[in-house]
């Protein structure tokens, strides 16, 4: 399989070495570039020589290097996309927590009766000391999440 790939690459290199490119302007003043010589009326004709291929082992190395660079760029863009998504999720989570903390703080500061549940799951109304503790906790949460 390697021999076939090498032979194919050598064949393409040999064909490319003999390739000629022609550039001319036709009668409508349009620039035409082709691998075949112009036919008919031509205003201006240039013959462009193709570059000679490099040594036989080097194109394979260049192709491998290009492939590695492509994969590296692809990996970097994938990592950047994942990082962006992660940052967006974190920002959305902070926003949700901020809204929740502000809502809790607003309810606690409103003076309304606030009920909570104990370890058994039973509801009880918090007293003023507990309210102050909960307000302090809610303010800290607002400061931490609402930047």
Image (cartoon, grey):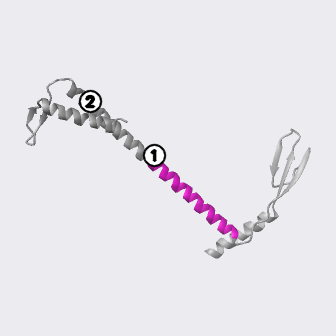
Q: Residue at x 62, y 64 (%)?
A: 65
Say which of 125 and 127 sits in front: 127
Q: Picture coordinates of residue 131 (x, y %)? A: 16, 31
Q: Main secondary structure of the magenta part?
A: helix
* Disc 2 crowd, CA 10 A, few/some/many (<14, 14-19, 20+): some
Q: Is residue 10 above or below residue 128?
A: below
Corner quadrant of residue 28: top right
Q: CA distance from mark 2 to mark 1?
A: 29 Å
Q: Which mark is residue 84?
A: 1
Residue 40 seen in the figure:
no
> If the image is split into quadrants, where does the N terminus sit?
bottom right
Q: Is residue 86 above or below residue 136?
A: below
Marks 2 & 1, CB-CB < 8 Å contact: no
> If the image is split into quadrants, where does the C terminus sit?
top left
Relative horizontal placement of residue 16, taking residue 71 as reference (left or right) = right
Please report whichever mark, 2 or 1, sits nearer to the chain's N-terminal start.
Answer: 1
Say which of 86 and 135 sits in front: 135
Say which of 132 and 115 sits in front: 132
Relative horizontal placement of residue 57, taking residue 146 as reference (left or right) = right
Corner quadrant of residue 31: top right
Residue 20 seen in the figure:
yes
In what element is the residue under mark 2?
A: helix
Q: Residue furthest bottom?
A: 3
Q: Picture coordinates of residue 113 (x, y %)? A: 14, 25
Corner quadrant of residue 145: top left
Q: Residue at x 65, y 76 (%)?
A: 3
Q: Residue at x 27, y 34 (%)?
A: 139
* Residue under pointer 2: 103
Report if residue 79 lies within the magenta region.
Answer: yes
In what element is the residue under mark 1?
A: helix
Q: Which residues are magenta?
A: 58-84
């Amino acid at each position: 399989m390697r021999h076939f790939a090498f032979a194919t690459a050598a064949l393409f290199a040999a064909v490319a070495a003999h390739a000629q490119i022609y550039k001319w302007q036709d009668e409508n003043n349009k620039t035409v570039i082709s691998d075949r010589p112009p036919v008919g009326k031509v205003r201006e004709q240039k013959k462009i020589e193709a570059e000679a291929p490099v040594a036989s082992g080097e194109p394979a190395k260049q192709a491998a290097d290009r492939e590695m660079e492509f994969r590296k760029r692809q990996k970097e863009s994938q990592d950047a996309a994942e990082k962006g998504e992660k940052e967006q999720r974190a920002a959305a989570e902070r926003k949700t927590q901020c809204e929740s903390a502000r809502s809790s703080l607003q309810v606690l500061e409103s003076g309304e009766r606030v009920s909570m549940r104990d370890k058994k799951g039973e509801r009880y109304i918090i007293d003023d000391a507990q309210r102050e503790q909960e307000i302090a906790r809610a303010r800290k949460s607002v400061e931490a999440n609402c930047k």
